[in-house]
Image (cartoon, rainbow, N blue to C red):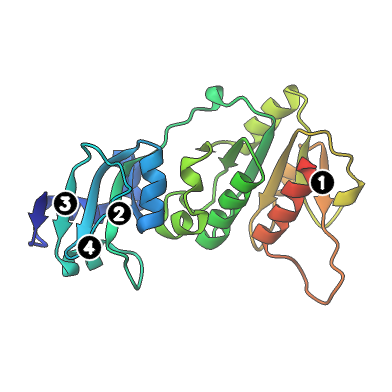
Amino acid sequence: MKYIHSANNPQVKQWKRLLTKKERDKTKTLLVEGFHLVEEALSSSGIEEIVISENTGLPPSWNYGDIPVTTVTKDIFQSLSDTETPQGVIAICRQPEFHSDQLDGDKYLLIDAVQDPGNLGTMIRTADAAGVDAVIIGDGSVDIYNPKVLRSAQGSHFHLPIVRGNLSDWISKLRKKEIPVYGTALENAKEYTEIKTVGKYALIVGNEGSGVRKTILAETTDNLYIPIYGKSESLNVAIATGILLYYLRN
């Protein structure tokens, strides 16, 4: 097992750069932090290296085979961590590779310019739980490998395809496959319970402040809304996504 004690070590500097989207996009790698996320990454066979803080041990149940494990000082580990109370383990992983022509399902979540990392991660996790076949991320959304997105998704990045794409192109492709495409809107929309579900669907949800773009809403099969019975102006986008995904599935 290798031990690094200098913050000036070139490998440490490279790991730090992975905290930026630019470097993640360039290298097609990412950092995942914490025992649960690293264990999820292990199940996907995408780990290149495991980094642990000194005096931190790996669970004996983990089968990491010939994956290199490097120990670093607590100060170095803290500089790599994105959390206030690090658990002492990080993995450098290859980004899962999915191409649009490889996706062959009938349940999709399309996301239009959602910018809050916690919301995006929760939506990915909820899509995973609801049995969605793929999540399509449109322009303007936060990076899917942002550390806060990864933590909120709780490993779902390694369970289902998540791809960046042009939402208009995807709507056209899905409708050609006779998959109903539902937008979310407050105006010119149907209450979601009016829709008769058919076991396949694509749901589009949008930006926390402005919702789904009108140009996108004009291309859908129908647009839906969730009624508000109390005094709140609106639902959080991640909560609304969960309600609609489960309704459309059933």
Q: Which amino acid does label 3 sit on?
A: Thr
The earlier-in-sequence mark between 3 and 2 is 2
Q: In this rendering, does residue 9 appear at all? A: no
The kind of secondary structure element at disc 1 is strand
Disc 3/disc 2 C-alpha distance (Å): 15 Å
Q: In this view, does 120 lie above or below 231?
A: above
Neighbours of disc 3 within 10 Å: few (<14), some (14-19), many (20+): some
Left or right, 6 with respect to 167, comes to left
The kind of secondary structure element at disc 2 is loop
Disc 1/disc 2 C-alpha distance (Å): 48 Å
Disc 2 designates what residue? 59
Q: Where is residue 202 in the image (x, y as percent from the top left)?
A: 71, 38
Q: What residue type is labelled 1?
A: Asn
Disc 4/disc 3 C-alpha distance (Å): 11 Å
Disc 1/disc 3 C-alpha distance (Å): 51 Å
Disc 4 designates what residue? 56
The kind of secondary structure element at disc 4 is loop
Q: Where is residue 250 in the image (x, y as percent from the top left)?
A: 80, 42
Disc 3 designates what residue? 70
- Residue at image location 74% in from the left, 22% down from the top: 176
The earlier-in-sequence mark between 1 and 2 is 2
- Residue at image location 51% in from the left, 40% down from the top: 159
